[in-house]
Image: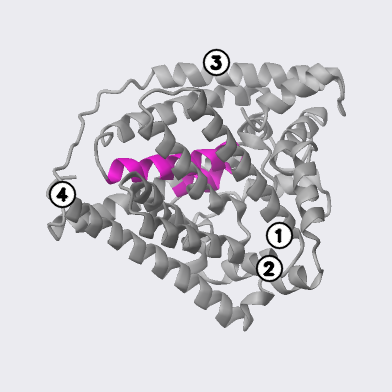
Amino acid sequence: MVMFGIPHLLMLLVGEVEYPTWVLNKASVFVSLFCIFYLIGVKLCPWHGKLIVPQMTKKQIQKIVRVFIFLLLALIVVRIYILYRMTGDLLNTSWGTNRSISEESILMQLYGYFYYSFSSILLVCIYWKMYKYVIIIVLTLLLGVILSRNRMEILPIFISFIWYLLLYMKHINIKTIISIGLLAILGIYLIFALLIFRHAGSINTFLSNNIDVWEFNQSIINMFFSDDGEFGLRNVFYYFIYHDNNFPFFGEGHTYIRILLGFVPTSLSLGMKPSDFAIAMGQAWKPGSIGFSMHPTLFGDSYANFGMFGCIIGLFWGMFIGCLDSYARRFTHNDIKGLLLLILISSRLITIARGSVYNGFMGLIVGIFILNIIFYFISRRKIIFKY
């Protein structure tokens, strides 16, 4: 609702609209019905889980933390090595370079699945006041984000601090709300900064442009009050409504067919698994573009897949998140796994909310699987006794 509801409401109140009133009204009805179905879906999945509370000492927690930090550092080092081997100079890497390398390297394709599982350890370190590890993890994540230009990869940092405030404060007061609000604004600021940095090309190009700090900062601030960046994604949703989904591959449910066949490689699906629907939406938004993907928020993606009937898909998301919440609650009092799940789930749900539905969904499912595998081996090594 942050990426659609608030900007949509403000636009209606101000009256500065780019599309006819009927488009905005149709979008309002669609989103309202989607949310109603979503709430029904959540209620269909009440929590019946049993809390799993492990007995862990501070020493055991530190051992697990070191395991995850090692995995995170190894992951970033592997990415740096692949980028250097493919480009010869890390300063020549760009967003386009990263995408090209990802298409050629299976390790780069798997990177995102492991990244959110490993980076979630930041909240554990903050919660247990392991400040030395906090600094190491934050610097490592920032290095990875600078090289990848993937602004979503910065989410674990800010979500970890926000969740810490929510967990640490026994009662939510004005101070907590202001702190969370400032963290959210800082997070959005850096996301916009990374978007500008991405558009600049390679790191060498960015540095050679003699960027003025004040002009760079002003460009970021302007994005808060314009339709650029994440706040402009709703315009793509309006665009699809205005043209009544009259684009190739629209209205065929491709996103959800891909989800159903998520673990089947496209090349082995005998033509049943469609190509990434985000590319089709990108071509609809910018005709003639090649390889350009578009994520028009979860609402826009649902409409593009099913038209007005897409509001019913809110039932699926309600049930999915209800079941996810039921699963995560089982580890509410788990000093490690519960905190890791908070960050993994939060990061991936934000990805889904902005419209990267397939990637967010599959990343979440695989991420939870990775965590379970890691904790299985940890338990076998008797670092902890019950998880």
Determine whether, in the image, residue 227 is placed left or right of residue 297: right
Closer to the camera in the image, 155 or 180: 180
Please state which of the two labelled residues, at mark 3 or mark 1, is closer to the viewer: 1
Task: Give x and y (percent) for residue 275.
Answer: 61, 52
Where residue 143 sits, quadrant-wise, is bottom right
Q: Earlier in the sequence, mark 1 or mark 4?
A: 4
Q: CA distance from mark 2 to mark 4?
A: 44 Å
Residue occupied by mark 1: 198
> Label 4, label 3: how many angstroms apart (C-alpha)?
44 Å
- Of mark 2 and mark 3, the one earlier in the sequence is 3
Q: Residues within 10 Å of mark 4 (few under 14, many from 20)?
A: few
Q: Which residue is mark 4?
A: 57
State the residue position of label 2.
Answer: 94
Quick one: SS at disc 1?
helix
Of the image marks 4 and 3, the number of the one nearer the N terminus: 3
- Within the magenta stretch, is there residue 254? no
Q: Are marks 3 and 1 in contact (CB under 8 Å)?
A: no
Label 2, label 3: how far apart the Cα atoms are: 42 Å
Q: Look at the image and give the residue range highlighted in magenta.
A: 336-363
Name the kind of residue labelled 1 in the image. Arg
In this orientation, does residue 203 appear?
Answer: yes
Amino acid type, label 2: Ser
The amino acid beneath tag 4 is: Thr
Of marks 1 and 4, the one in the foreground: 4
Say above or below: 159 vs 59: above
Cα separation, mark 1 vs mark 4, equals 44 Å
Disc sitting over residue 36 in the figure: 3
Asked if marks 2 and 1 touch (Cβ < 8 Å), the reply is yes
Q: Position of residue 64 (x, y in %)?
A: 25, 56
Query: Residue placed at 33% from the left, 59% from the top?
Result: 68
